[in-house]
């Protein structure tokens, strides 16, 4: 598919800490990604529950390698990799991907955090990292869309504190002041839209209080020169082989072979009590 990323979009990312790319994946590609998330046995067998403070839970599946599955190819197409490299400023590798599945009336909340609030503890020395949320469903405030603090990537890494066994949150006292002074933006997306955001951009989401599900695929990249020095969590550098932009449609509904993706058996949550 034809793809362009404008100088205005690049400037918006560096100014705000995020940018939306409408229609990054077309309807046929979104259909294949949705079917893979719903039908792939590897996704189903590695689904975890991330609970919130009220007992609601978001289903997640995490994997650390971009293989030849539909979702592995999505992380390797030039429109994704080239955009990530442009915004990070140097060559990148695939750091992790995950499905976040908020079911109707059940999907839980995520409290304010930075991705680098986690990844710092995974051995990445610099915040030269980026995430891209690909909407598989329409995301709205009603079904628990992402919320971001505009310009918060310029704050640097904020201390995080334990919230639950499976969630940490940005310092609540600091967050109270931040949201008084800076705009909080709802990230409303249509299926196939991509939302790139800096690893220090503060973000959260409410629980899904609607009768519409909210499934998203989040693909994360790290600068090659920022390779994680912690190796026991399986996210250190592996070369990223780009494919052609039509690779997803050529492959069709291709599932994981059960080996390439390196699925995680538990969420990566730094033990901040031990760290402190």
Image (tube, grey):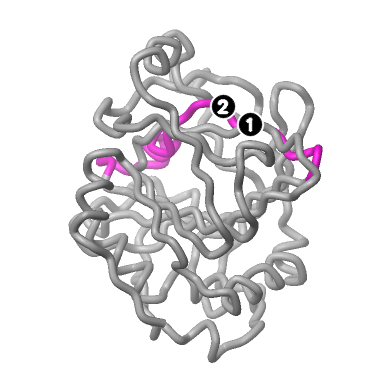
Query: Is label 1 or label 2 in front?
Result: 1
In this view, 78 is above or below 103 = below
Mark 1, residue position: 206
**Real-space Cα distance between discs 1 and 2?**
8 Å
Could one spot residue 235 in this view of the protein?
no
> Residue 38 appears at what percent x and percent y?
75, 66
Q: Which residue is mark 2?
A: 111
Of pointers 1 and 2, the one earlier in the residue sequence: 2
Question: How many C-alpha atoms fall within 10 Å of the one at disc 2: few (<14), some, or many (≥20)?
Answer: many
Quadrant assignment, res 220 = bottom left
Magenta-span inclusion, residue 116: yes
* Residue 216 horizontal/vertical position (percent): 60, 54
Please state which of residues 33 and 94 is positioned toward the viewer in this rendering: 33
Residue 100, percent from left and from top: 63, 50
Give me the residue at 44% from left, 28% from top: 184
Q: Residue furthest bottom?
A: 250
**Which residue is painted at 38% across and 25% down in the image?**
183
Q: Secondary structure at mark 2?
A: strand
Give the quadrant of the N terminus: bottom left
Which corner quadrant holds the C terminus? Answer: top left
Q: Position of residue 63 (x, y in %)?
A: 57, 59
Magenta span of residues:
104-127
The answer to which image quadrant residue 148 occupies is: top left
Q: Count neighbours of disc 1 (C-alpha within 10 A) and say few if under 14, some if 14 to 19, many if 20 or more.
A: some
**Relative vertical location of residue 246 with respect to residue 215 in this rendering, above or below:** below
Q: Nearer the viewer, residue 195 or 261?
A: 195
């Amino acid at each position: 598919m034809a793809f362009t990323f404008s100088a205005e979009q690049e400037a918006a990312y560096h100014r705000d800490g995020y940018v939306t790319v409408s229609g990054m994946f077309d309807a046929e590609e979104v259909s294949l990604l949705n079917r893979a998330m719903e039908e792939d046995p590897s996704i189903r067998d590695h689904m975890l529950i991330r609970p919130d403070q009220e007992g609601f839970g978001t289903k997640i599946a995490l994997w650390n390698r971009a293989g030849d599955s539909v979702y592995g190819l999505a992380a390797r197409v030039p429109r994704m990799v080239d955009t990530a490299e442009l915004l990070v400023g140097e060559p990148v590798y695939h750091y992790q991907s995950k499905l976040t599945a908020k079911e109707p009336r059940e999907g839980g909340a995520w409290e304010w955090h930075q991705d680098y609030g986690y990844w710092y503890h995974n051995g990445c020395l610099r915040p030269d990292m980026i995430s891209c949320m690909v909407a598989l469903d329409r995301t709205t405030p009603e079904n628990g869309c992402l919320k971001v603090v505009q310009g918060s990537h310029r704050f640097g890494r904020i201390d995080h504190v334990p919230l639950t066994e499976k969630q940490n949150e940005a310092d609540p006292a600091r967050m109270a002041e931040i949201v008084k002074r800076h705009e909080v933006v709802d990230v409303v997306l249509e299926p196939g839209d991509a939302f790139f955001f800096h690893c220090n951009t503060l973000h959260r989401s409410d629980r899904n209080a609607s009768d519409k599900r909210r499934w998203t695929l989040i693909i994360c990249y790290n600068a090659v020169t920022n390779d994680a020095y912690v190796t026991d969590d399986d996210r250190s550098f592996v070369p990223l082989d780009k494919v052609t932009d039509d690779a997803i449609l050529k492959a069709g509904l291709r599932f994981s072979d059960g080996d390439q993706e390196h699925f995680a058996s538990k969420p990566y949550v730094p033990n901040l009590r031990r760290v402190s």
